[in-house]
Image: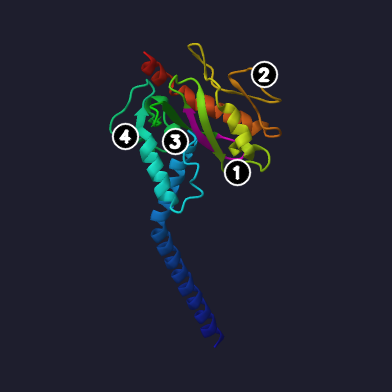
Amino acid sequence: MKKQTNLYIFAYASIMVIVVAAILSFASIALKPAQMKNLEIEKKLDILRSVNLAADASNVKDKNSYVEGEFDKFIKQRLVVDYKGNVKEGVDAFEITLKEEQAKDIEDRNLPLYVCQFEDGSVKYIIPVLGKGLWGPIWGNIALNEDMNTIYGVTFDHKGETPGLGADINKPFFMEPFKGKQIMNGDKFVSIIVHKGGAPEGDIHGVDAISGGTITSKGLEAMVKTCLSDYVPYFNNVRK
């Protein structure tokens, strides 16, 4: 009797495991399209926010339609450039995964670039960036004015930086000072320097680091420099 009882428990447990696994698998497959759509909307929203657009995204009834409408209205081009600054054909910038591209040799990388045009005709160039913070990946978008030198706006975010310290890279008090800073010194690319203890007054290339978040701040500095440097050949080609 005991043996039969044990077999029953084993059989029952095995069946439950199979049933639960089947349910979870079905749920994962069924929910994947919605999950992918959410990721697409958040990616578009981050791009728009770098140029101060889509401010009402959290207040509108249909967020997806609102974000897609703003994106289609203002993002006029989705370019991909190579390490020499040439525009590549047949590649969609939105389909590019930065992590995968950064694992390649520079000669093989696809570099995404978004061109935003406002209703007044002014143009901004938006560059996605990806790097490493203290505890994990950090990322964002940097929008440049038509001079391809002056920063118009930025968005930054993180996966697991320390709350109240490195995690503050996505807070307005840290991102706002990037506006108006310049990444070039004449013809030389210098990027943006994140200064521990505060940037010198009048420094057009410097911003303040986050107090207590030095490692994340320097990781962000390295991310900005590394990613933007890949686009310098494109900037030079356009300026010619």
Dot label at residue 201: 2
Q: Amino acid at mark 3?
A: Leu
Task: Kindly identify which numbered label has been placed on residue 91.
Answer: 4
Mark positioned earlier in the residue sequence (2 or 3): 3
Give the amino acid at mark 2: Glu
Q: How is the image coloured?
A: rainbow
- Tell me residue 198's x, y (percent): 69, 24
Question: Percent x, y for residue 224?
Answer: 53, 27
Assess disc 2: are there few (<14), some (14-19) or many (≥20) residues with their C-alpha within 10 Å of its C-alpha: few
Which is more foreground, mark 2 or mark 3?
2
Instruction: Give whichever of discs 4 and 1 has the lower sequence position.
Output: 4
Question: Mark 2 falls on what kind of element?
Answer: loop
Which region is colored magenta?
Answer: 132-143
Sequence-wise, the earlier of marks 4 and 3 is 4
How packed is label 1: few (under 14 Cα within 10 Å), some, or many (20 or more)?
some
Q: Secondary structure at mark 3?
A: helix
Q: How many marks?
A: 4
Outermost residue to the bottom: 1
Mark sitting earlier along the chain (3/1): 3
* Mark 3 surroundings: few (<14), some (14-19) or many (≥20) residues within 10 A: some
Residue that mark 3 sits on: 98
Residue 94 falls inside the magenta stretch:
no
Q: Find out whether the residues at labels 2 and 3 contact each other: C-beta distance under 8 Å.
A: no
